[in-house]
Amino acid sequence: MYVTVCCLESKFQAGNWPQTKTKLKQKIKNILDKSKLHETKMAKKQHPSKEGMTAGWIIHNMMLSGLCVVEGKLLLWYHYKIQEFVGSLPKEIVKEATAAIAKLQPVVLSQQNEVFDSTKSGTSTPSLPKSGTSTPTPTTEHSSTWVIENTGMQIKYVQTKANLKKCLSSNEILNGTGEGLCAIDCEGVPDSLDLIQIATLPQQAGSLITIYVIDCTMIGIELVCNSILPLLQSNHIIKLIHDLHMDMVALSSAGLEGFNCILDTQLAAEDFTGNPFVGMNALLKMFGAPEHPLKNKMQQIMKSNTNVWSKRPLLKSYIEYAGM
């Protein structure tokens, strides 16, 4: 199982992880056949016959190890656990995994090209699933950027290391080297840090506000936090955060410190109105801006499901809520 998990992590690091047990079983069968994992010394120790190591047996042990779980018809992945699992493997297993991945290399490259070539801009109308309806289709890695209609905003859902690196290199606000303004929010706080959302103003006249929804669960909290630390510490970029208390607890718990130029819009509203409980929608209303269309509905969902931000894959509507 260990080498197979390494192969899966390599094959799907760009995204598009199988979302059902049937699809996963087929992917594992392909890996076993193409990489000849049945013939490795470790496999022969664990399974004297080829029939002993089956895709079903591997999936069963992956679930026992907490790497994935079945919820309804969907297969949910815990990517931070996969990264910890792969990172803790002994040298003997890593050596066999490296050899197996080398045999799969053409397949890996093909898979990555398929994901990135099929990334297309789209449009979306903000909405959340109605209570009592069937489970909506989760988001897929094929559509990582899309426009939210009638808002002047586009979402960039960042869920791989490669995507994060690309976004950082293309936006001087995001990487902390520029001057200006951005808005920041987090989800899963204060107990966890599942998403970090960063909104930046258009870089050119007539373009859209870009909201980067960065998936810490899939990329890794430490890597994401280290990547945005120059932004948080910059003296040349004003960071707007509404009611920053829980966000700061989560960011500080991740080891970040030395923040500069942060403005808590909730405290600013309190100073302006005398009301210590000015919510985001109330603040938007004060300035004649439209309210967050999904705020109240999403708060109801979060009350009934406290793990909504830690489960993967995320619903597209949840990503839009976080971004807006």
Image: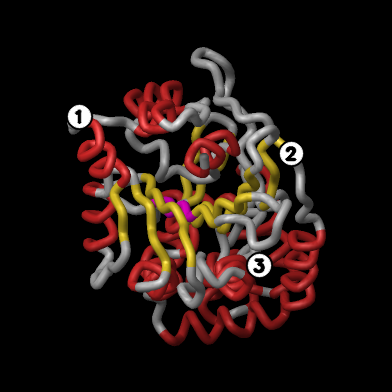
Extent of the magenta region: 194-198
Residue 37 is covered by the magenta coloring: no
Q: What residue is pinned by disc 3?
A: 11
Residue 8 image offset from top left, x and y in percent? 60, 64
Residue 154 image offset from top left, x and y in percent? 65, 47
Task: Say whether marks 3 and 2 touch (CB < 8 Å).
Answer: no
Q: Earlier in the sequence, mark 1 or mark 2?
A: 2
Question: Three-letter amino acid code at disc 1?
Answer: Asn
Q: What residue is pinned by disc 2?
A: 123
Q: At 50% across and 50% down in the image, what residue appears?
A: 77
Of labels 1 and 3, the one closer to you: 1
Calculate the distance from the C-alpha at mark 1 to the C-alpha at mark 3: 53 Å
Label placed on residue 275: 1
Calculate the distance from the C-alpha at mark 1 to the C-alpha at mark 2: 38 Å
The number of numbered discs placed on residues in the rendered structure image is 3
Question: Three-letter amino acid code at disc 3?
Answer: Lys
90 with respect to 20 (left or right): left
- Looking at the picture, the colour scheme in use is secondary structure
Of labels 1 and 2, the one closer to you: 1
Residue 45 image offset from top left, x and y in percent? 49, 75
Q: Earlier in the sequence, mark 3 or mark 2?
A: 3
